[in-house]
Image (tube, grey):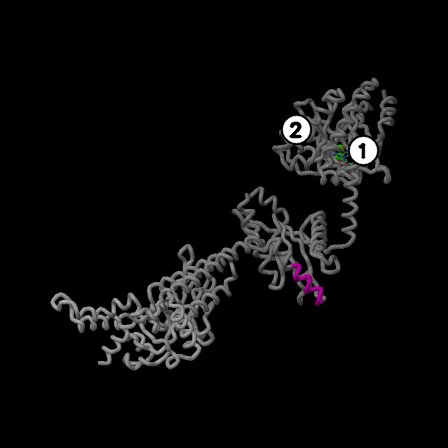
């Protein structure tokens, strides 16, 4: 019996534990048959056990020849029976390199007498992993006569480990925030690697569209020759949903190959699909953040950051190709008016409409950006059409009638152009110059297109220099007042004096208010200048009184910025208190246009001034558009007829009619009236006939310094 012989041979030589198990049959002979199974029975059990375990069990002699091998090992080596294997060595069964590495381990075990436990190695035949344990085979005397080996299949554990590693790799990539495309290919490749025999593809929804496209595929998926439909409709492919965190579908993860995987593989695949979902979410988030950082939230147009970046590129290309680029500042005219009168929602809507209209006209290669408020910057590259006609088209588009909050509107805009490289080589220069050109359009009444001109820069530089000088002038108190008397033609008396400021410029000499008051208004310096004027005027008026001259009203001009200033009333009160001038001798002159800007606010301020005891005159009257009803609400004491109506008397019948009308109006409102700029006897005569007896002008006196004024007043008194 060959079988028994093998069994005996093994049993006779195995190590302590194994010997006990396998040697049992021999001991059993001594035991009573009635209590113990027969030797044959035991042998059958043992054989069944050894042959039924899926693990490999074998014994070899000192030369590495198989003494015994269980069924699993025999079959794995392509043989049928144990007998076929006995006497063979690993060199007969495996490539010599593999056989040698096994022999080396086994030699060590036999020579040292020490077991080698838990060695992990790949299967030599078929796929998977084994964990090998090898112990010395000893005879009864304890002498090593060979080696016994036992294996366990650890393929599942190994696969689990590699799946876990793959999963960790993908998660790490997501956490690091890699780019989406390489991440997806990486994931597909990894799947093919860790699940042998599969191919993988990631199909995603095209933005907005319902259709799927192949975003990534593993090498053996054959992505070049398949369409998304091939994958979705083919039974060889299994699809797992890729969802976003909010439950929406990004696409599917498709796996080709056997669907007959262990649960852990499916778990892994589900995990990968989830990880891909997270990666896509993060990708979109990052895209959205980048978009928000570079776009205007209201209109969706690029913001200044993006414009700067793109314009840089545009200018670099233009430099190489000597192509022309125009930078255009565009400002919607009177936007503030719409915003204030129709509300912010309407204002926002208007900006969106304008943004859309410009975008539609601007053309693909060009840039548009909203840089805040109602200001847009365009950057145009030279096309067939020249810049000005391109801009004219944009202007027409903006001017198309529209209805907003129930109001029919027609918009205009102001545009300033600066060209590369003529008007600047850098974006910063071009911006500054286009802005300057736009500013010029606004100064000239808005609604127009203006090309930058180097003279503008010269002007701006001068203006900047002037405002610096003006600041110093305030510190050094370079302002003096001249005074122009006002005369009552009936009595011949001086009834008032208007204080007019002059700037004694250290090098340029006397500068008249027309040349620096607008700048002072713009820069805010009008506030300290106005304060100084008030103090000087009140002080001078009080001085004349102290000198015993008949008291006169002193008129002081107040500009809009100064009138609206919070501390204005306090300024006036302080000037009066400081000088000791009684308030009734001070008359503040404000223009009609100033009052009409904010009627309600003006009325309040005027009442406060009245409460101080100060009187109020409307300067340049007739040039604004105040209605009779509005005029009635102002607590005024005097109207000053604007010089422009007087100049052409007696040649202009209209002006004469208007002047007469103003005089009647004043009488009706019970206000005093005075005519400014009276230069001729004829004008004075006409005014007198019309009922206006107070005059101011060169006819009587030019504005003169204080000492001269003192002499004039002395001569009269
Ligand atoms: P305004 O208030 O209308 O002052 C009258 C201007 O007309 C003065 O010019 C005066 O010199 C000039 N004028 C007076 N009579 C005649 C005349 O018969 N013929 C002609 N052609 N002109 C005459 P000025 O002094 O150059 O002042 C110009 C403007 O500057 C003033 O116009 C006023 O609006 C503003 N201004 C003057 N001083 C001050 C000031 O202290 N504060 C503020 N905010 N504005 C001032
Ligand atoms: Ca005045
Ligand atoms: Ca005036």
Q: Please tell me which residue lies in front, 625 or 490.
A: 625
From the viewer's perspective, is residue 52 above or below residue 171?
Answer: below
User: Disc 2 or disc 1, which is closer to the eye?
Assistant: 1
Which residue lies under the disc numbered 2? 606
Q: Main secondary structure of the magenta part?
A: helix
The percent position of residue 506, horizontal first and vertical second, equals 85, 37
For the N terminus, the image quarter is: bottom left
Q: Is residue 419 left or right of residue 167?
A: right
Between 140 and 506, the one nearer to me in the picture: 140
- In the current view of this chain or complex, which residue is farthest to the front? 141
The total number of labels drawn is 2
Q: Quadrant of the C terminus?
A: top right
Q: Is residue 144 above or below residue 428?
A: below
Q: Position of residue 619 (x, y in %)?
A: 72, 33
Asked whether 44 falls inside the magenta stretch, the response is no
Q: Closer to the camera, 406 or 659?
A: 406
Q: Quadrant of residue 608?
A: top right
- The label shown at residue 520 is none
Disc 1 target residue: 476
Left or right relative to 40: residue 316: right
Q: What residue is rendered at 82% in x and 29% in y?
A: 483
């Amino acid at each position: 019996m060959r079988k028994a012989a093998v069994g005996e041979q093994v049993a006779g030589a195995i190590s302590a534990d194994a010997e006990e198990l396998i040697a049992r049959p021999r001991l059993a002979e001594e035991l009573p048959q009635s209590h113990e199974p027969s030797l044959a029975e035991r042998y059958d059990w043992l054989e069944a056990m050894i042959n039924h375990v899926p693990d490999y069990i074998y014994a070899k002699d000192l030369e590495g020849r198989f003494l015994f091998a269980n069924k699993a090992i025999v079959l794995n080596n392509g043989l049928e029976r144990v007998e076929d294997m006995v006497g063979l060595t690993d060199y007969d069964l495996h490539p010599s390199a593999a056989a040698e590495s096994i022999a080396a381990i086994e030699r060590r075990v036999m020579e040292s007498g020490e077991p080698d436990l838990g060695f992990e190695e790949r299967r030599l035949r078929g796929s998977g992993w084994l964990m090998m344990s090898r112990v010395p085979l000893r005879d009864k005397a304890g002498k090593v006569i060979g080696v016994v080996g036992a294996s366990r299949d650890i393929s599942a554990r190994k696969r689990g480990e590699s799946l876990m590693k793959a999963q960790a790799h993908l998660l790490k990539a997501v956490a690091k925030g890699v780019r989406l495309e390489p991440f997806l290919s990486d994931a597909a490749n990894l799947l093919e690697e860790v699940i042998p025999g599969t191919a993988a593809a990631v199909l995603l929804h095209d933005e907005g569209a319902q259709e799927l496209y192949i975003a990534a595929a593993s090498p053996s998926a054959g992505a070049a020759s398949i369409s998304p439909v091939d994958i979705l409709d083919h039974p060889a492919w299994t699809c797992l949903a890729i969802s976003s965190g909010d439950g929406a579908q990004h696409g599917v993860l498709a796996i080709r190959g056997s669907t007959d995987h262990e649960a852990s593989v499916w778990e892994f695949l589900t995990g990968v699909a989830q990880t891909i979902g997270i990666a896509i979410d993060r990708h979109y988030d990052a895209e959205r953040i980048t978009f928000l950082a570079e776009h205007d939230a209201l209109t969706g147009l690029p913001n200044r950051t993006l414009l700067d970046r793109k314009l840089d590129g545009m200018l670099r290309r233009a430099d190489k190709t000597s192509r022309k680029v125009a930078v255009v500042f565009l400002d919607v005219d009177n936007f503030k008016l719409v915003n204030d009168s129709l509300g912010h929602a309407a204002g926002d809507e208007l900006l969106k409409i304008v943004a859309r209209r410009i975008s539609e006209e601007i053309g693909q290669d060009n840039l548009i950006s909203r840089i805040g408020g109602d200001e847009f910057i365009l950057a145009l590259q030279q096309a067939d059409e020249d810049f000005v006609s391109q801009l004219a088209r944009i202007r027409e588009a903006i001017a198309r009638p529209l209805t907003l909050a129930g109001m029919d509107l027609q918009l205009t805009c102001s545009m300033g152009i600066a060209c590369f490289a003529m008007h600047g080589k850098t974006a910063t220069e071009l911006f500054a110059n286009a802005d300057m050109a736009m500013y010029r359009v606004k100064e000239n009444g808005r609604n127009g297109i203006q090309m930058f001109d180097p003279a503008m820069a010269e002007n701006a530089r001068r203006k900047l220099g002037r405002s610096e000088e003006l600041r110093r002038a305030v510190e050094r108190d370079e302002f003096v007042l001249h005074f122009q008397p006002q005369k009552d033609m009936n009595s011949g008396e001086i009834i008032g004096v208007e204080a007019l400021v002059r700037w004694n410029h250290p090098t340029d000499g006397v500068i008249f208010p027309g040349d620096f008051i607008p700048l002072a208004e713009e820069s805010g310096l009008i506030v300290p200048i106005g304060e100084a004027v008030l103090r000087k005027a009140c002080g001078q008026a009080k001085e004349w009184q102290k000198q015993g001259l008949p008291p006169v009203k002193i008129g002081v001009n107040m500009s809009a910025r100064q009138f609206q200033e919070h501390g204005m009333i306090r300024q006036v009160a302080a000037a009066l208190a400081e000088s000791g001038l009684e308030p009734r001798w001070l008359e503040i002159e404000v223009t009609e246009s100033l009052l009409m800007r904010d009627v309600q606010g003006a009325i309040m301020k005027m009442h406060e001034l009245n409460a101080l005891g100060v009187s109020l005159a409307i300067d340049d009257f007739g040039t604004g558009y105040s209605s009779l009803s509005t005029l009635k609400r102002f607590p005024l004491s005097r109207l000053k007829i604007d010089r422009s109506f007087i100049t052409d008397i007696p040649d202009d019948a209209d002006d004469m009619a208007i002047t007469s009308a103003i005089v009647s109006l004043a009488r009706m409102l019970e206000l005093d009236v005075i005519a400014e700029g009276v230069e001729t006897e004829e004008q004075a005569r006409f005014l007198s006939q019309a009922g206006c007896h107070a005059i101011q002008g060169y006819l009587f006196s030019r504005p003169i310094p204080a000492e001269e004024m003192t002499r004039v007043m002395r001569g009269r008194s």
